[in-house]
Image: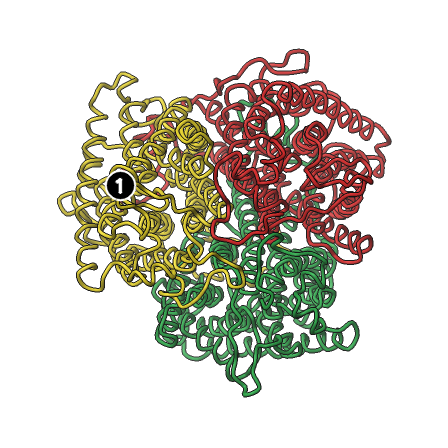
Chain colours: A red, B green, C yellow
């Protein structure tokens, strides 16, 4: 609050400029110019987008708890709160420097730790604060994706350790490669808002975690068949998907980090159409395979469309966005079934399929559907040949190798030391009691087997 | 993410302009001017408003499920997800063209299908993308209103068919009349943000649907008396109302589609005051009629105030806004009772009263309370005579006739072909199991009669 | 909706300017200038921030209901809806004038009631609307804080009366002292976004209310020991905290009321880091004291960090923000235990500790951690000596005395007239039935003792 602003605040902008000088001691008192306004528009846009992306944490929390059992809900809330909290501190201390610091051989950055580039007395230094908060909420998104795949059986303390590792090291290195001036960026890879940088990083780490953890008790029978373990709160899961979709309007259009870049309008349109198409095709795919239109699959279809369009949202036409979303919606249903019934990897919320598989698909799709008229380069279907597709594939593969390997190492070390999984008795009773000494739904009658 | 942005991003705006050229291939490299900044401000404002209106989908979903029974919650989530998804695609392919295309006799547009007016290489073409996403989320709002009135007994496949029809045809035609340069717009009708265009369209289609469907099993007794069927989750319903109120700040102020139009501030104030007044008068009305201040009625009162102020939010004073909201808050309680107890039409969430009745009232109220000093023309109380009121009434009546008739036709055709209503056994067991093969609250003990 | 905007809207900004003239009758038709754009940026920023702060109402409602019992959920929703509604009207009629009107001896304002300073025909008059909505949502925040501490036993009608008093009188007087040009502002007190003005006002009123009400039945045993009364919905409480964190990005950065003031970026960073630090230290403190990391305490820790950084968010470095948040996270756990187990004051959600204690701490912390380089003045650790700290302490103490005394008077008068507390039978059965004649979770099996 500008603490000396009285109600006679006329003329507004001049007074505010004067007051900001008074209140903050910094030199904003110069008159507004087209240039200073453009910087303000970009800063406002980037911050609001960051706030929307932050809110996705609530979406992830609701989706994850909605699709799992009531006895683990407080544990899931705690994981989602904490991956953002320790992620924020870790990204402040280390991650941002690795991601955007002066590059060492295109592999990682080595400067800018502890937000040392932020400076409240210069325009460039102020921009670093805006840029940092935007990047911070992205880092936390990568971290939180893993939570879902490892739900209902992971030790809380292990999850804390892992969260620091992904936010401070695993994710920022990929970010440096593709967004921080690293080797993949030098090759021309396009991942506008992070199908690979954010989502498949989360998805492949989730894959490593789910493999090392093993399935939940009762998930697979001796004959290898799989049991469905139903989520306990579908309205909360749906609310989570709506929140994520809402937040994605910060994630994708916000990734211009410039409100003066009018392609934000195109990006909002492609993002929305891909999500819509993904939920529709996932619904019909599930309808055909299971006989009824499963709500969970349609919800995951919307997320699949969103993840897939994230790489190319600024580079493809609306109709291509619909195609990308539609394919992702089919892919996610097939992938969830394949991972569950063939690979026998237990991923309670489908995070590996939604974020890993559809993130990889979306990144490759840029190589196929990109149009220079929208931005970047032409893909396979628009006269660009295989060049871009090859670079995209190289990026997808490299990120998979790095993340999967690094996550395997982290989780293996955790497993060998503090342990990765709670004991069977605690898992049956629920992690809310076991890890946190509390119940999520005090007063409600809940079946003990659930 | 601007993929070559390094942390040394100084000077910010210039670099971003250069990068946007690099990344998107489009010509944004010219220096910022007052004119280009004004366009950016308008685009940013319109997009953020569109995101807020999108989020209202979550609000509608929560209100509808909160006020109905647990056994139908997954079905309601699916309907709300799908009316937005198929609505988005339908509005992209057809609706937008009918609403804003070159007019045929002031009745409907005939160009601009498949967003053919969007062009990433020109400023005007880029604006079309921003304008489209803003209009798309409005179309989906009209569609989703109907869901509540038809809750707990409608076949899912029928709902899908209806959703396409309203988003692609019924709504855009009204939109063309009033916002797209059609005949009511030529007469000077004022419906700034859509009390009629959006809300009463939804409300009258809901009326047609609820009549053709008939009441839920057990709703009315043989003697004609009505049974209350309680909602299963009041906190979710309240959350939904808060989300809707929040989203309405995009709906009404955003309808300037211009952040440089400072009347956005007035609109935010009138919107908020009408909502506050509506919830207060609805509370007292319910208190007087039922002996206690019913939470559901107060929540619906807030929505009634919001719906009613939507038409005149840019054209009336704050005190008029309070009066409009206050009247709507009383009206909604009376209307809910009348529709239930006298007309015997079963509307589980009060959608016909909130959106149809209060939408019509709010549109008429513009003819009474409008002041040229705020915008548009003077209404009855401010020296404008009956002229504006007459035009408003003509608009309300015309839209009622068109929407009610068109919706009756659509629902009748659906009823005669795929059928409109689930069988009694399924209705008793719940649509979650019957339509989607799942439960919403797995693990919770729920009374079978509910 | 600009109701004559056709799809051929080129060139956009010019057309919109022309249309806004057409639609609103006000004179916006002048060409865009750097100055008019700066005003637009500030207005857009202030409004969006206000919308985010409004949304915090949903967060407060979810936190309060999540941490209390199922039988009182509809009552809590009603209180949260109504304190905002009557607060809005009260702040419009009276509060805003007291807070920002022409000062009487630096104690309270005496002009500007009923938003009489708003004028749609001038730039300064339009700004008053934007400023009012921003201030209105702050007033409502102060009001709603009290609800949590008085949950599960307060008569609804008494809560209504109190809500008007705090929004229209108690809060605006403090606001006048510190933000409206009053005596504390003249002394140089820094409370940028309201650790004291908003949060500790709510917290101290909550303290008075909780003392006068007495503890819930069954809270304390005859030997003075305290029983835990578990919350009924931890996922909703967590959702509430995420919503509050999200809304705080409007609360703190928005308090510049200027998007052209680039310190908004710094404020977003300090706000986020303090919240993260608070949740981490609260978790570890609870872990150490109770043996397990309690989810509720970690959630309250995030809020504690947010409340504490609110005063100094524009005046301290990121690392100071982390320290402030970290201390608040420890403090809130200690304070909750002290108030419960030593003082035997029953505060169901910890509102007194989170908002009162951490609000006071955060205000004092400005006197320690403030740096002129960020804004304002230097605190104790940065060469400013005890001067600022003394002023901050004076402010904290003065506000405590005024608010605690005024709230005691209000609640005592209410207690002596309409009564403050429901009868024991109603409290046991739940306020949903007793006050509102309804259930919150119809159909769910809920333990009667809860």
Answer with left or right where residue A118 lies relative to residue B6: left
Q: Mark 1 points at which residue?
A: C179
> Can you see residue B33?
no
Neighbour tally class for label 1: few under 14, some 14-19, many 20 plus, Cα within 10 Å:
many
Quadrant for the N terminus of chain B in the image: top right
Subunit bearing disc 1: C
Question: Where does the image place residue B429, in percent across and percent down from the top left?
Answer: 66, 66
Task: Give the camera-side residue of C195 and A17.
Answer: C195
Which residue is at a point 20% across and 29% down the rendered structure image? C391
Element under disc 1: loop
Give the residue at the far left of this rendering.
C105
> Can you see residue C207?
yes
Question: Where does the image place residue C97, in percent across and percent down from the top left?
Answer: 24, 53
Question: Where does the image place residue C267, in percent across and percent down from the top left?
Answer: 41, 32
Which residue is at a point 73% across and 61% down the rendered structure image? B94
Question: Where does the image place residue A104, in percent across and percent down from the top left?
Answer: 64, 11
């Amino acid at each position: 609050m500008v603490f000396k602003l009285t109600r006679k605040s006329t003329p507004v902008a001049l007074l505010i400029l004067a007051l900001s000088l008074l209140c903050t001691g910094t030199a904003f008192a110069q008159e507004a110019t087209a240039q200073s306004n453009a910087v303000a528009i970009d800063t406002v846009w980037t911050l609001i987008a960051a706030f929307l992306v932050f809110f996705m944490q609530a979406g992830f929390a609701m989706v994850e708890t909605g699709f799992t059992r009531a006895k683990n809900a407080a544990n899931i809330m705690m994981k989602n709160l904490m991956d953002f909290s320790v992620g924020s501190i870790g990204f402040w201390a280390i991650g941002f420097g690795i991601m955007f610091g002066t590059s060492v051989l295109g592999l990682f950055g080595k400067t800018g730790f502890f937000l040392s580039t932020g400076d409240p007395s210069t325009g460039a230094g102020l921009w670093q604060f805006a840029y940092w908060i935007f990047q911070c909420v992205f880092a936390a998104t990568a971290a939180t994706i893993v939570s879902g795949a490892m739900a209902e059986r992971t030790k809380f303390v292990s999850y804390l350790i892992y969260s620091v590792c992904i936010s401070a090291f695993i994710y920022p290195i990929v970010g440096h490669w593709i967004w921080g001036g690293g080797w993949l960026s030098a090759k021309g890879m396009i991942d506008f808002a992070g199908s690979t940088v954010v989502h498949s990083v989360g998805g492949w780490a989730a894959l490593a975690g789910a493999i090392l953890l093993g399935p939940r008790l009762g998930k697979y029978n001796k004959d290898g068949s799989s049991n469905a373990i139903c989520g306990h709160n579908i309205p909360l899961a749906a609310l989570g998907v709506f929140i994520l979709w809402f937040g994605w309007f910060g994630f994708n259009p916000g990734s211009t980090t410039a409100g003066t870049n009018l392609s934000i309008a195109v990006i909002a349109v492609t993002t929305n159409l891909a999500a819509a198409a993904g939920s529709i095709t996932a619904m019909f795919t599930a309808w055909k395979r299971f006989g009824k239109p499963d709500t969970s699959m349609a919800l995951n279809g919307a997320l699949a469309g969103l993840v897939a369009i994230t790489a190319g949202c600024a580079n493809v036409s609306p109709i291509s966005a619909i195609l990308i979303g539609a394919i992702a919606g089919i892919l996610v249903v097939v992938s969830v079934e394949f991972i569950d019934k063939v690979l026998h990897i237990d991923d309670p919320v489908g995070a590996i399929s939604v974020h890993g598989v559809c993130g990889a698909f979306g990144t490759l799709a840029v190589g196929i559907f990109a149009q220079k008229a929208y931005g970047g380069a032409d893909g396979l279907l628009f006269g660009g040949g295989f060049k871009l597709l090859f670079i995209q594939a190289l990026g997808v593969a490299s990120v998979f190798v790095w993340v999967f390997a690094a996550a395997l190492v982290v989780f293996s070390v955790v497993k060998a030391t503090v342990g990765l999984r709670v004991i069977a008795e605690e898992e049956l009773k629920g992690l809310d009691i076991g890890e946190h000494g509390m119940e999520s739904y005090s007063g409600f009658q809940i079946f003990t087997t659930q």
